Image: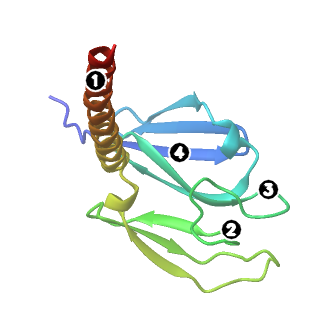
Amino acid sequence: MMKTNKQNYQMLLFHFNSGLSIEYDEDNNTFQFHKLHVCDDIAKLFAYAYVRINDVILFFGGWNGDSSATSRPVHNSLHSFIAILSEEDNDIHIIGGRNNAHALVLTHIKTTVRAWDPSQLLKRESKLIIEYWIRNSEIKFGWIDDFNKIIINYIKMQ
């Protein structure tokens, strides 16, 4: 009987509009490569950092040649840094980097994974949408009741 380590490792690489998933199977000593789709907003950037949390990849910073640009910037002008996920998967550490003048900066930003969790974002957004519709519905229901009273009074006057 053959002893298996059951160790599989995965690495993600991104560069401009190219994404690659590399999987290593330690038992069979084999590599598998898979091309990944890169969204348009990330494809035009370089020098960004990213971490994978479950099935979500979070991108931070980036440089497009003129200015730092992402949908959720870590710092206005930070690029060329690294992002590390803590062993407990609770925190993301953003370390090092360069500013717009390309000068090295000593940076250590710690942020919780929860702050970037898409399911948490969806819950918050859903709550805001539901609250909006409840407020909007109450306004419309109140208006409809008043409108009905106005119509009834108008008909009585005829």
Residue at 79% x, 64% y: name it.
Answer: 67
Q: Tell me the distance, in whole angstroms, between the alpha carbons under discs 1 and 3.
A: 65 Å
Q: Amino acid at mark 4?
A: Leu
Residue 69, position as x, y percentages in the image: 70, 58
Of the 4 image quadrants, the one containing the C terminus is top left
The amino acid type of the residue labelled 3 equals: Asn
What amino acid is labelled 1 in the image?
A: Asn
Q: Are marks 2 and 4 in contact (CB under 8 Å)?
A: no
Under circle 3, the secondary element is loop
Which residue is at the front of the view, 141 or 15? 141
Report the residue marked by disc 3: 64
User: What is the CA distance from the residue labelled 2 to the residue labelled 3?
Assistant: 10 Å
What residue is at 42 percent from the left and 36 percent from the top? 29
Q: Is residue 130 left or right of residue 75?
A: left
Q: Which residue is mark 2?
A: 79
Q: Is residue 61 above or below residue 141?
A: below
Q: Earlier in the sequence, mark 2 or mark 1?
A: 2
Between 123 and 77, the one nearer to me in the picture: 123
- Residue 33 vs 120, above or below: the answer is above
Q: Nearer the viewer, mark 2 or mark 1?
A: 1
Which callout, 2 or 3, points at the residue further toward the start of the chain?
A: 3
Q: Nearer the viewer, mark 4 or mark 3?
A: 3
Residue position for label 4? 12
Instruction: Identify the residue position indicated by label 1 in the image.
Output: 153
The alpha-carbon separation of the residues under discs 2 and 4 comes to: 19 Å
Q: Residue at x 61, y 72 (%)?
A: 75
Name the N-terminal-most of marks 2 and 4: 4
Q: CA distance from mark 2 to mark 1?
A: 67 Å
Look at the numbered discs 2 and 3 and tell me whether their residues touch, using CB distance below 8 Å: no
